Amino acid sequence: MTFSSGPTSFNPVVASPPQLGNLTDMSLLKNIQNQNFTFALINVTNDNALTGATIVGKTSRDGGAQAPIAGTVTELGNGVYNYRPTAAETNGNCVSFLMTATSAVPENLMFLTGGLHKNVSSQHITFGLFTTAGAADAAASVSVFVSKDGPAQSSGGGAVTNLGNGQYDYTPTQAETNGNNISFLFTATSDIIQGLSIFTVT
């Protein structure tokens, strides 16, 4: 008895990997509901954890105008709060949330849903500025310094936009994103300096 067979081919169907977001900053996913992040509030008068606060939040997407937050705030205890944004609030490449309350040092949180892309123009990052007394500086004259992959800083050549309530947006130049790790330093007279170190994605 003889068995014969011709050539065969096997073409497996490979499922697409799940969307994991930007692993370099463990970001929120874009335009997805039922996500959460936490933040802490400090009492500006004594540096203790601020408990029992009524949160006033503002959100901005890709450098756009602020809007009041529409999601849900839950107090977890010890000055820590959880926020569940709406899907619409995450529908941007750079989504930011400015959280504050009476007697609180403002807390700015920025999420890059797709990461900061290497050597790409027209991207956004946000930051908050507050005085050494812990109050939001809503009218700061901001200086920006940028360093790529460790060398000396240079003055930022991008655009700073005042979003209001002590929150600012910076649009770096394309050249400023052309590195694996980009460090941004934001300063203003009488304010606490703010630094961001971001790993780029391709």
Image (spheres, rainbow, N blue to C red):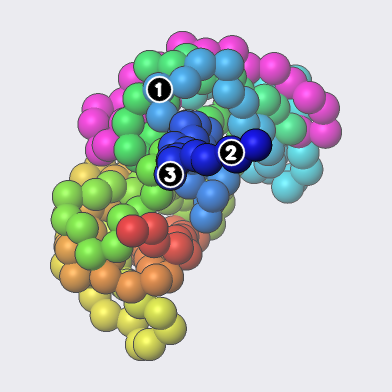
Instruction: Where is residue 96? Give x, y as percent.
Output: 42, 36
User: N-terminal of the two: label 1 or label 3?
Assistant: 3
> Which residue is disc 3 drawn over?
7
* 35 over 131 or under it: above or below: above
> Which residue is disc 1 drawn over?
31
Q: Residue at x 40, y 79 (%)?
A: 149
Q: State the extent of the magenta-drawn residues as a range.
A: 58-79
User: N-terminal of the two: label 2 or label 1?
Assistant: 2
Type of amino acid at the residue the image marks with label 1: Asn
Q: Is there any visible trace of residue 19 in the rendered image?
A: no
> Which residue is disc 2 drawn over?
3
Please name which of the two marks, 3 or 2, marks the residue nearer to the observer: 2
Q: Residue at x 58, y 16 (%)?
A: 34
Please name which of the two marks, 1 or 3, marks the residue nearer to the observer: 3
Type of amino acid at the residue the image marks with label 2: Phe
Secondary structure under the numbered disc 2 in the rendered image: loop
Question: In the displayed structure, does residue 153 sit left or right of residue 195?
Answer: left
Secondary structure under the numbered disc 1 in the rendered image: loop
Indicate whether residue 69 is drawn in magenta. Answer: yes
Q: Residue at x 21, y 45 (%)?
A: 161
Q: CA distance from mark 2 to mark 1?
A: 57 Å
Q: Is there any visible trace of residue 88 in the rendered image?
A: yes
Please count the marks in the image: 3
